[in-house]
Amino acid sequence: MESREYALGLDFGSDSVRAMIVTTDGEIVATAVSYYAQWKAGKFCNAVENQFRQHPQDYVDSMTEAVQAALLQAPAGTGSAICGIGVDTTGSTPVAVDRTGTPLSMLPEFADNPNAMFVLWKDHTAIAEADEINAHNAAWSSDYLKYVGGIYSSEWFWAKLLHILRVDEQVADAAYSWVEHCDWLPFELCGGTDADQIKRSRCAAGHKALWHAEWGGLPPEDYLTGLDEKLAGWRDRLFSETYPSDESVGTISAAWAQKLGINPEAVVAVGAFDAHMGAVGGEIEPYQLSRVMGTSTCDILVAPASDLGDRCVEGICGQVDGSVIPGMVGLEAGQSAFGDVYAWFRNLINWPVREIIGQHPAIDPETRTRIIEEAADQTIAQLSQAAAELPIDPQSVIALDWVNGRRTPDANQRLKGALMNMNMGTDAPRIFRALVESTCFGARAIVERFESEGVQIEGLIGLGGVSRKSPFVMQTLADVLKRPIRISATEQTCALGAAMFGAVAAGKFEQVEQAMKAMGQGFDQEYHPTDAHAALYDECYQAYLRFGAFAEEEVSQPQPTTSPS
């Protein structure tokens, strides 16, 4: 019997890493999840200040645990038959590193310094720096933001780098370079020891760091120093070349091969962001909008470069040749909060349970924990059931989904979530329904932006946990968008896409499209819009737009200052 070959996909999400082992002919043989211990404990974060940092030790510990757990599920000998490894991560999630490519927080003197850790994608401490980049670019002779939608975001590479340089002199002095999470993990797995040798992802560099072939890589030195002299010299210490994810970084190091129990000749692919690899795992096709729906959303579209020509789509998160499928332009949009909106509301209404039950002296600790966890686990399902029974009412509660700012269209991380039209009859299901509708209205705004910019949307693909776990959300989305949505048969499309790239980098397929055909899992659900809901949701959507315009105008007003007493 011919021996089988396997690929390993590693998907580093906001709170955990998922490992998937899949054969090169498409059989998923094992998956495992490991949650970041320090992140779960709430370390290094301050949600009130929009500070979200992650320690690299969490990444390596959880990766080890997830891979080992997956191998225990897999047939004997699977580890030695893994030919390729793909890695995807959140982004932009960069970190300061020393000359060896070691994140500064891995060094004893910076072990507890959040500024020396990975700055998670949803960290918005660099809003001021993003504003400065936008103003600086507007006054510059060349437009270096035209391929990222025309607006730079606080979620992205340069804003975060500049913010840390300004607020932490020790980190600024010790840093040799800055590295995206999706670039550091492959480098780490291959045993890299020279930051100058890190292979940088075309996906990350093009969508978040202003890399483009038109200007020979990153923006020129005078553009950067014109923004802030603290950026002097950084261009040369970063990168000029970038690579698509069908290329190899190298083979796994002997140390990591032994630790994980993997074939020491396994090839590690160039990394990329989760949604981009997730789109590949979900078998994206040209002009099929792939919506990866988790804590946030990323909307990914691919199109032949010849179709786009010189067109630059305004207000999105970039268009980059080869960022998704080599040979095509990848276009990215998305929402800064999607599942996070629902999780926020779940946590809000469960506050009494946590605080009262959690401290009740007559209930033993084990029972307290069980009650609190059961309440949290059941909240969304119960709210969804109750909300689904409510009529669509343009006069009912209207919500804005900007609880973590707005990513697209037209990035503005100063925006906040809001509710309108509440009265004494407003209950939790009505608020939850409004929140779900708001996230769907945000999705509609993205679709309408693509189409108004001349980029057609021929179909929708739903990916990620929300797409498979939340029928109420998905039916609402189909109704609001007035389009059918196909749902991938596997929830872990990001890990699957990473495995596909691992197999291509290992030479098992010549093209990514071949890997998608051989390893893809197909679609097992489809949501269709309800015609009777279309006109009502059109009216609700217009109310959402009016409310959003009002809220945005309020945020744009000069903020009052308080004089010291």
Image (cartoon, grey):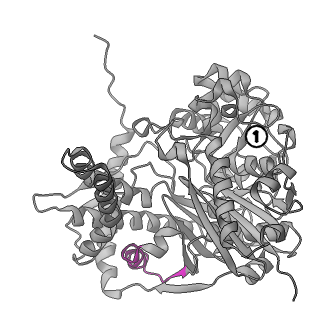
Q: Which residue type carries mark 1?
A: Pro
**Vertical placement of residue 17 versus 514, above or below:** above
Foreground of the two, 290 or 309: 290
Give the residue at mark 1.
219
In percent of the image, x 51 and y 56: which residue is there?
408
Taking 332 as reference, is 226 left or right? Answer: right
Q: Residues within 10 Å of mark 1 (few under 14, many from 20)?
A: many
- Residue 157 image point, x, y percent: 65, 42
Camera sees residue 424: yes
Q: Give yes or no for residue 212 being in the magenta stretch.
A: no
Q: Position of residue 196 (x, y in %)?
A: 86, 39
Task: Look at the picture and state if 155 lies above or below 228.
Answer: below
Question: What secondary structure prevails in the magenta region?
Answer: helix
Residue at image coords 73%, 69%: 499
Place of residue 18 in the rendered image (x, y in percent of width and height, measured from the top left): 61, 62
Write down the region rendered in magenta: 470-487
Between residues 28 and 471, which one lies in front from this camera angle?
28
The percent coordinates of residue 91 (x first, y second) are 62, 51
| Residue at x 38% of width, y 57% of height | 343
Q: Is residue 478 magenta?
A: yes
Q: Quadrant of residue 35?
A: bottom right
Is 138 on the left or on the right of 226, as rendered? left
Q: Is 373 on the left-hand or right-hand side of 27?
A: left
